[in-house]
Image (spheres, helix red, strand yellow):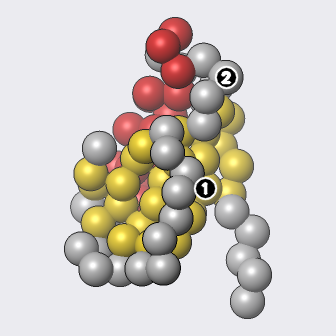
Amino acid sequence: MKAKSIEEAKSMAKGKSLETEYKDEAMYIIYCNRTKYFYVATDGLIRLWERLIGYYENGVYTAEKSHS
């Protein structure tokens, strides 16, 4: 799923994480520098041009810690 803002991406990820189909599965929020969009997916693979923002699991948000 693709979103233009972090708020929209968080809303989509939280909603999906509460669905029975995704119980106990993380819904990752990833920002892509190339497209300038946020993506919500169950695949946590991060490419060089992407940045993990955080993830929702069972409706609970966990922010990614900054390593800078």
Tell me where residue 43 appears, x and y as whole percent.
49, 45
Left or right: 46, with 34 as reference point: right
Which amino acid is tagged 2?
Asp
Number of the label disc, if any, that sits on residue 54? 1
Number of the label disc, if any, that sits on residue 10? none
The quadrant the C terminus occupies is: bottom right
Identify the residue at image location x=52%, y=10%: 20
Label 2: few (<14), some (14–19) or many (≥20) C-alpha neighbours in 10 Å: some
Left or right: 41, with 17 as reference point: left
Which amino acid is tagged 1?
Gly
Q: Quote the CA–CA distance across marks 1 and 2.
A: 15 Å
Identify the residue at image location x=75%, y=69%: 65
Tell me where residue 35 appears, x and y as whole percent.
24, 74
Residue for badge 2: 24
Identify the residue at image location x=49%, y=53%: 29
Is residue 11 visible from the viewing direction of this image? Answer: no
Is residue 3 visible from the viewing direction of this image? Answer: yes
Tell me where residue 46 appears, x and y as whole percent.
52, 65
